[in-house]
Amino acid sequence: MRNILGATVLAAVLTISTSACEVPDDGSTAADRADVNQKKKNKNGATPAKSKKEAPKETAGQENARGSAESYLDLSAFSRTGLIKQLKFEGYSEKDAIYGVDAQRANWNKQAAASAQNYLDMSSFSRQGLIDQLKFEGFTEEQAVFGVNQNGL
């Protein structure tokens, strides 16, 4: 039984290895066929192999601005423009400040709601007064109204 199994495995290996070494009638090599197959795949909608170039890395200023923006959003609610202004006040360039803030992918509606809640925790506001305050902080009209609505005004 062992000899029959061994002979069967040996025959299968020989068949596979000899067919892999065969040169087709057109004279192409395995590498040529692989290249043609890759090109066919690309024409059929598959994504071509990525180049070895990597995406540009963050500059030190961008990295620091991103970290500062994250820290601020962990501590308090900000509007996008308010947070950009804060980072610029700290000395970040406008370009790095915008990068750092946008890298947060913050939900500015949620930030407006949290900011509205913070104001209501400190003082009483009319609906319009709170909307105006949120707009002053840099929220858009729509974000300010959302924030006020979320807090029941």
Image: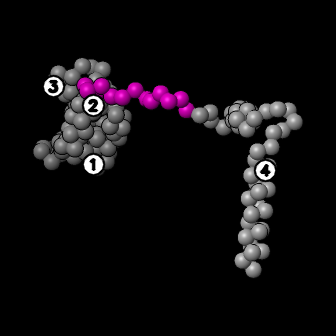
Which three-letter amino acid code belongs to the residue tagged 4? Thr
Total marks in image: 4
Spatial distance from mark 1 to mark 4, Cα to Cα?
76 Å
At mark 4, the secondary structure is helix
> Is the residue marked by circle 2 packed among few (<14), some (14-19), or many (20+) residues within 10 Å?
some
Q: Is tag 3's residue or tag 1's residue first in the polypeptide sequence?
A: 3
The residue identified by callout 2 is 63
Spatial distance from mark 2 to mark 3, Cα to Cα?
15 Å
Quadrant location, the N terminus: bottom right
- Name the one closer to the observer, 144 or 96: 96
Spatial distance from mark 4 to mark 3, Cα to Cα?
71 Å
Q: Residue at x 79, y 56 (%)?
A: 15
The residue identified by callout 4 is 18
Q: Residue at x 32, y 37 (%)?
A: 104
The residue identified by callout 1 is 151
The residue identified by callout 3 is 90
Q: Is tag 4's residue or tag 3's residue first in the polypeptide sequence?
A: 4
At mark 3, the secondary structure is loop
- Residue most toward the bottom? 1
Spatial distance from mark 3 to mark 1, Cα to Cα?
31 Å
At mark 1, the secondary structure is loop
Q: Mark 2 and mark 1 in contact? Answer it, CB < 8 Å.
A: no
Please state which of the two labelled residues, at mark 1 or mark 4, is closer to the viewer: 4
